[in-house]
Amino acid sequence: MSILRNITTKKSIYKWDKMKTLKMLGLYALICILEFALLSLFIHIHLFTGIYIFRLFIYAVLAGALLLGGFIALRRINVEFIVSGVIIAILMAFFFIAIFAAVIDRSFSVFFLNFMEQHQEESFTMKDIEEQLIDNYIIRLDATQKRISEQLRIGNIKEVKGGYKMTEKGVRLVKLFRFIEKIFPAEEKRILY
């Protein structure tokens, strides 16, 4: 019992400073809010051209770099806090991009839910839904050409006489996806094998 009493009664060199913790959390929240504000600004002003998702990741890093430079220039805040806060903000932006922005940009489910929301007074058969997929999502929004253009820019396919052909880079990517899908298979049906 005396050992426990000695441990609890001695002053700890690791005393928890609640105010410092709250300030740090507030700073992290501010950095994250500013990260997302800059990310949104960059998206709206179309700072770069190129593949949408890749641009978002570049915007997130650029926003983080601007925040890092700005806060370090203030010289009133611990650099370690700023660096860790910016890293956390960039990772949160990456998470947001991967979970929300990519799904909104690429998902037929999101497209169709939006269509249904705009036509709430109607009901839709399976055939209606398939027609929406083909007529509006694939044809009207030019979804196929968008994917082909992206894959050409990335270098996974190349244009050849009479069409497109997979590159070695594309083959490696599909092998990587197959490996990942073996570990984390798609819910109902395997897509890649």
Image (tube, rainbow, N blue to C red):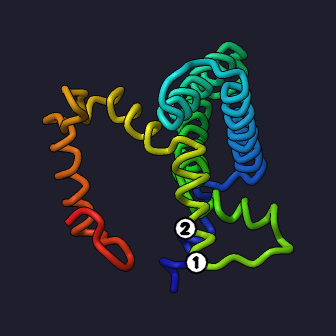
Q: Tag on residue 126? A: 1
Give me the residue at 51% from left, 27% from top. 58
Give me the residue at 57% from left, 32% from top. 60
- Position of residue 148 relative to residue 70, above or below, is below
Foreground of the two, 170 or 133: 133
Q: Tag on residue 178? A: none
- Would you say the residues marked 2 and 1 are in contact, meaning their CB atoms lie under 8 Å apart? yes
The local secondary structure at tag 1 comes to helix
The local secondary structure at tag 2 comes to helix
Residue 83 rendering spot, x and y as whole percentages:
55, 31
Give me the residue at 69% from left, 37% from top. 36
Residue 53 rendering spot, x and y as whole percentages:
51, 37
Which amino acid does the dot numbered 2 rest on? Glu
Which residue in the structure is indicated by mark 2? 130
Give me the residue at 60% from left, 69% from top. 129
Q: How many labels does the image show?
A: 2
Foreground of the two, 49 or 143: 143
Foreground of the two, 52 or 144: 144
